[in-house]
Image (cartoon, rainbow, N blue to C red):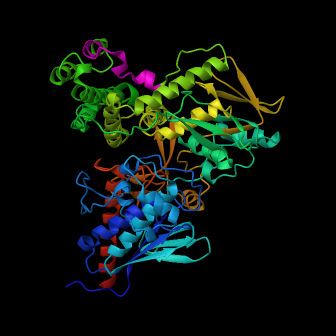
């Protein structure tokens, strides 16, 4: 019979947001199997209450919302998750909201929001934080008595190796000796880098207002004055948050004028925004309906075997030239599957014939395009990735008014189409995108993948394209954008937006490939979230580990010696352990989340064999096996 040892084994989870809670849930789930009878202290360390962490905390604007429907948010394993640990299902956010007791929520207002939650609701981030806090409390309540959870309200500034363990140093000077440390730090704040360095310096010298890529909801936005012209570069989710805070967050309001349209009534406190990006249009609105046909079995073309075959055929793999055609074929096949079975009147042949015709063809070839045109008669039903990715490419407008009218029409058409089940083939493509994303590590982890291609084709192109198609805002946000444009608060700059610093006049200047017009301002926002950046992070913990060589940024090298930094902390994908600058794996230190090479979303979509949930289980089991071995050595 296994008995308790004199000293409890211990682990520190550094970061109590969704990723930290996910690891905790898996520790609780696996402890009975991997460390039966072992007394374990789990230290959860975060300056914010565990559950929501910084991003999902209660202390933020109630106007901010999740970017996902309630039905698409979960933190629990289900039958699709392929992991060694036990499957312990739990409610999605949509299932949780109407059933959770009101007293378990932070305020009566959030209780009312939870009660009214529907599968297609886009909850507030405050309610998302309450969902995460509830999951944390559930994990604590279900933990066996030998697993004790201890919360520390503070920030970790260093983690040092010590004899048979890790020494965790908090910002108040206190120290904690543990057997293992798990870094679940979420998105790291960074110093300006690249072009942002020069623009920051330019703004300081000319007394201008400039916000480099940052988590805008954490920044002081008061420098952007009422009525001031502001260049805003970026049309993604960071842009949406900032726009909410600087318009409705300053007292403006929306009035429903019928037919789903809104009118914006300014408060007078808003700046005037001139918004542009590479695409020149916002991300596509989220789809809010269900497919008509059953989902096809994924994957069919973009498989592990197909990637391995590519590696045999090519000495050096290119993401865009070699992997993307397989992905694109998977996406189109899924879209036409939904079109043929859900809307059979919109194809000229039945699905089996359509599938049999396309299966042997290479995607994107003249033969492929000809076959699609013959079997999908209406061009509106054909899937055109170039048009989806760059809808303004090649278009030139006489002036800003013509451009703005075109972009307004584009946004309205996107809202309408994404709410219309007649175009459910779009949802077929969306679901295939998620399936493809789950297999991306198969490509990125292949040693034959060109470093330049990974940085330029995946980070520089594909991930943004995926986000624009599959990770766009709630439709309501695009309705608001139209209302802001009609009210004169937002103007559109166009595609391939450029910005330069005019030293002579001390102004930012912006324009685009879409018109010859330019705008000059004394304020600018780079409305993009910063990527992972080990070299420029402001995190004292990561900087300390980096400076001692105890963590290493993944740097990719081309055969010609060209080096490409990814900004990500290197981890061993077998168990999420940290790899140091010498290439040695630290057996007692783990890292998960967007700051690491195992990056995956914190939330998971149900029934998608979530990467995040699998990684959480892998890391938790590795921690428990380490702790069980530690206590065995201690007792002996």
Asked if residue 606 shows in the view, the reply is: yes
Q: In the drawing, does residue 295 fall left or right of residue 537?
A: left
Q: In the drawing, does residue 526 fall left or right of residue 465?
A: right
What stretch of residues is rendered in magenta?
Answer: 371-389
Image height of 42 relative to 23, above or below: below
Q: Quadrant of residue 38?
A: bottom left
Near-viewer residue (142 or 101): 101
Q: Position of residue 109 (x, y in %)?
A: 52, 61
- Is residue 346 a member of the stretch shown in magenta? no
Q: Residue at x 51, y 38 (%)?
A: 564
Q: In the drawing, does residue 594 fall left or right of residue 250?
A: left
Image height of 62 relative to 372, above or below: below
Q: Position of residue 142 (x, y in %)?
A: 32, 74
Q: Position of residue 559 (x, y in %)?
A: 44, 32
Q: Quadrant of residue 313?
A: top left
Quarter of the image for the N terminus: give it: bottom left
Near-viewer residue (448 or 513): 513
Q: Main secondary structure of the magenta part?
A: helix
Q: Quadrant of residue 495?
A: top right
Near-viewer residue (10 or 121): 121
Asked if residue 184 shows in the view, the reply is: no
Quarter of the image for the C terminus: give it: bottom left
Q: Position of residue 504 (x, y in %)?
A: 84, 28
């Amino acid at each position: 019979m296994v008995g308790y040892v004199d000293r409890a084994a211990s682990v520190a989870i550094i970061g109590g947001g969704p990723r930290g809670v996910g690891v905790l849930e898996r520790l609780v789930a696996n402890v009975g199997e991997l460390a039966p009878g072992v007394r374990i202290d789990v230290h959860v360390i975060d300056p914010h209450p565990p559950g929501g962490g910084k991003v999902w905390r209660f202390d933020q604007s109630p106007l901010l919302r999740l970017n996902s429907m309630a039905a698409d948010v979960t933190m629990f394993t289900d039958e699709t998750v392929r992991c060694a640990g036990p499957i312990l299902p739990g409610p999605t956010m949509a299932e949780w909201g109407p059933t959770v007791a009101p007293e378990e929520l932070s305020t009566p207002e959030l209780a009312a929001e939870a009660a009214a939650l529907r599968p297609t609701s886009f909850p507030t981030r405050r309610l998302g934080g309450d969902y995460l806090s509830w999951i944390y409390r559930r994990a604590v309540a279900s933990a066996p008595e030998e697993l004790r959870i201890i919360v520390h309200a503070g920030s970790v500034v260093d983690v040092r190796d010590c004899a048979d363990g890790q020494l965790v140093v908090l910002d108040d000077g206190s120290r904690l000796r543990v057997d293992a440390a798990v870094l679940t730090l979420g998105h790291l704040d960074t110093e300006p880098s690249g072009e942002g360095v020069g623009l920051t310096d330019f703004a300081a010298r000319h007394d201008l207002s400039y916000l480099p890529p940052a988590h805008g909801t954490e920044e002081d936005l008061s420098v952007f004055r009422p009525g001031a012209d502001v260049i805003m570069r970026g049309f993604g989710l960071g842009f949406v948050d900032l726009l909410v805070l600087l318009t409705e967050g300053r007292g403006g309001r929306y009035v429903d004028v019928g037919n789903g349209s809104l009118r914006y009534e300014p408060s007078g406190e808003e700046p005037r925004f001139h918004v542009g990006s590479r695409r020149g249009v916002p991300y596509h609105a989220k789809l809010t309906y269900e497919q008509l046909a059953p989902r096809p079995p994924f994957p069919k073309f973009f498989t592990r075997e197909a990637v391995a075959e590519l590696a045999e055929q090519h000495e050096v793999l290119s993401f865009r030239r070699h992997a993307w055609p397989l992905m694109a074929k998977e996406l189109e096949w899924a879209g036409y599957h939904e079109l043929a079975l859900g809307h059979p009147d919109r194809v000229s042949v039945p699905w089996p014939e359509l599938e049999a015709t396309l299966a042997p063809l290479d995607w994107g070839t003249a033969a492929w395009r000809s076959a699609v045109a013959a079997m999908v008669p209406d061009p509106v039903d054909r899937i055109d990735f170039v048009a989806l990715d760059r809808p303004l490419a090649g278009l030139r407008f006489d002036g800003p008014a013509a451009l703005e009218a075109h972009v307004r029409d584009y946004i309205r058409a996107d809202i309408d189409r994404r709410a219309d089940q007649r175009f459910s083939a779009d949802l077929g493509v969306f679901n295939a995108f998620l399936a493809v994303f789950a297999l991306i590590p198969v490509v990125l982890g292949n040693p034959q993948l060109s470093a330049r291609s990974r940085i330029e084709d995946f980070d520089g192109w594909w991930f943004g394209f995926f986000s624009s198609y599959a990770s766009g805002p709630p439709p309501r946000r695009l309705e608001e954008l139209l209302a802001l444009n009609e009210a004169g608060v937002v103007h559109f700059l166009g595609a391939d937006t450029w910005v330069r610093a005019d030293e002579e006049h001390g102004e930012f200047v912006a324009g685009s490939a879409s018109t010859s017009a330019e705008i000059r301002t004394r304020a600018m926002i780079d409305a993009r979230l910063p990527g992972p950046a080990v070299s420029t992070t402001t995190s004292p913990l990561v900087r300390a580990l980096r400076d001692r060589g105890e963590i290493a940024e993944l740097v990719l090298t081309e055969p010609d010696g060209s080096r490409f930094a990814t900004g990500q902390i290197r981890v061993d994908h077998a168990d999420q352990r940290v790899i140091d600058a010498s290439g040695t794996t630290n057996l007692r230190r783990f890292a998960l989340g967007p700051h690491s090479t195992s990056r995956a979303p914190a939330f998971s979509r149900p029934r998608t064999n979530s990467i995040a949930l699998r990684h959480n289980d892998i890391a938790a089991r590795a921690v428990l096996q380490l702790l069980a071995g530690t206590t065995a050595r201690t007792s002996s």
